[in-house]
Amino acid sequence: MSVPFQLSGPPTLSRSTVDRNEPVRTDPGRLAELWTTGRVILLDEKGRTPVGPDATSLATRPASAVADERPADAHLLGEHEGVGYWAVHRPMTLREGVASPDSAWGRWTGAASEDGEEWHDLRTIGALLDDTSAGLYTTAVALTRWHNRARFCGRCGARTEARNAGWATHCAGCGLEEYPRTDPAVICLVHDDTGVNGEHVLLARQPVWPPERYSVLAGFVEAGESLEACVAREVAEEVSVPVHDIRYLGSQPWPFPRSIMVGFAAVAPRGAPLHPADGEIEEAHWISRARVREALDAGGEIEGLRLPGPTSIARMMLTGWAGSQP
């Protein structure tokens, strides 16, 4: 008997082995120790970081090689096996145009330093990294992007300064304390109503995506809206299809700039006409399980169908659905 499909494991960017240990963030003595013996993840202005030769781990630096004392813009990511890991953003002069290990979206090329060390984007190497590196890099990108947007107080407009080892900001004008923001977004795999898991999945493409690139539907949660209500609204708005049997699959941080993708599955009648939202959805189609399996077996793309890259939770959702029975 068929059972509802699930994700095969934690989404790519949800993996982590690091202890965040919140109380340490306000302990000056311990923070000094963690900097002295710690490691630093450097990020350039595009959020790229240096990686090892096989792109499965990050090329971190000794913190002491970055600065003798902890800089004000060093953000503590956590501890792993007694080592503190920090994120530091620095402008870098790099040679652009290095091919990325995962060219799934064809957008985010890498770069290289003078000595040949390659720097890559989280979206293109996230799926290749080990659990520790994936968790560290995801948190590093999330924190640095938040700080880039939180330099001024949202209440009085005065400058802010980082506190709690990067996990808060304090307004110099009115004293307001703020914490890193995460915007919830839903991402939903909609399949037809044949059997338990359907025989076709609803895929769509945005006008700005590369040709033949399709994915499941997604959108941001509005104020005062539940996650399930957002699923129903977004699908209706984007392709004019009603859905039912909405169920949770899993979640993944997506710090571009500060989202968490909350994954769902839902059912829709395949006979319902699809009406792509003007300016938002260029095309939408029902795609058979056999065709999705063919694309997955070919590494993610075949003629006419390019699936999301392996770093995205969308890829894991499609993999779980394709491996299920109707």
Image (tube, grey):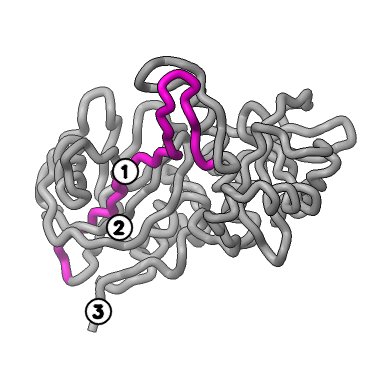
Q: Residues within 10 Å of mark 2 (few under 14, many from 20)?
A: some
Residue at (62%, 39%) from the top-left corner? Answer: 121
Query: Which residue type does callout 3 highlight?
Result: Ser
Q: Which residue appears farthest toward the top when viewing the image?
A: 157
Instruction: Residue 159: give x, y in percent of width and height.
Output: 51, 18
Q: Secondary structure at mark 2?
A: strand
Q: Secondary structure at mark 1?
A: strand
Query: Which region of the structure is painted magenta?
Result: 167-195
Compare residues 161 and 319 and report the one nearer the observer: 161
Residue 100 vs 160, above or below: the answer is: below
Instruction: Residue 71: give x, y in percent of width and height.
Output: 71, 34
Query: Which residue type does callout 1 highlight?
Result: Ala
Task: Name the residue beneath numbered marker 1.
Answer: 185
Task: Name the residue beneath numbered marker 2.
Answer: 288
| Quadrant of residue 299 within the rendered picture | bottom right
Which of the two labelled residues, at mark 3 and mark 2, occupies the earlier sequence position?
3
Instruction: Residue 313: give x, y in percent of width and height.
Output: 42, 53
